[in-house]
Image: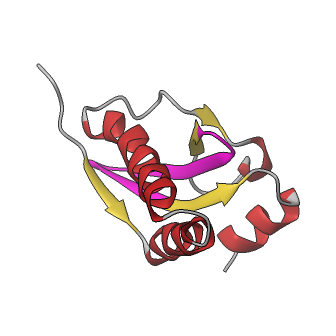
Amino acid sequence: MVTTIKIIWTEQPVSDLKNIYLYYEKFSRQIAGKLIENILKKTRILEKGFVNIGQEEPLLKGRNFVYRYLVFNNYKVIYRKENSYVYIITVFDSRQNPEVLIRTIDK
């Protein structure tokens, strides 16, 4: 029996995806759309109940929640589980300074 988990996209990752799209759209709408589609596709495994599939994010250890991430290309989709929900917290470009991730979560 497969457990269905509800995924909640918070405001931050929605904004992150929009910014990623707008950046890549300058080069190609098709590439931008495909990138966003693939990032979203990567998260669908969480809906099927495989919430522990992502590695724990070491920069966010010791907090109230366990933060995990999935990777697609250079992007980390940071999420946490709470009850029967998975909250997508941010979509982080791992080429950035890691301090940016900590500041994003601490908002």
Give percent across and percent down for residue 78.
57, 52
Q: Is residue 83 left or right of residue 10?
A: left
Measuring 69% from the left and 45% from the top, which residue is drawn there?
74
Determine if the magenta segment contains residue 81. Answer: yes
Decide: is 3 above or below 102.
above
Measuring 64% from the left and 49% from the top, which residue is drawn there?
75
Q: Quadrant of the C terminus?
A: bottom right
Which SS does the magenta portion mostly show? strand
Measuring 42% from the left and 39% from the top, which residue is drawn there?
42
Give percent across and percent down for residue 50.
36, 29
Q: Is residue 19 left or right of residue 98?
A: left
Number of labels in the image equals: 0
Residue lying at the far front of the rendered structure = 28
Residue closer to the observer: 79 or 24: 24
Give percent across and percent down for residue 63.
67, 55
Residue closer to the observer: 49 or 16: 16
Colouring of the image? secondary structure
Q: Is residue 95 left or right of residue 105?
A: right
Give percent across and percent down for residue 15.
51, 77
Residue segment shown in magenta: 72-88
Determine if the magenta segment contains residue 32. Answer: no
Residue lying at the far left of the rendered structure = 1
Q: Quadrant of the N terminus?
A: top left
Measuring 53% from the left and 62% from the top, which residue is drawn there?
28
Decide: is 19 above or below 8.
below
Decide: is 26 above or below 51.
below
Residue closer to the observer: 101 or 42: 42
Q: Is residue 39 left or right of residue 8?
A: right
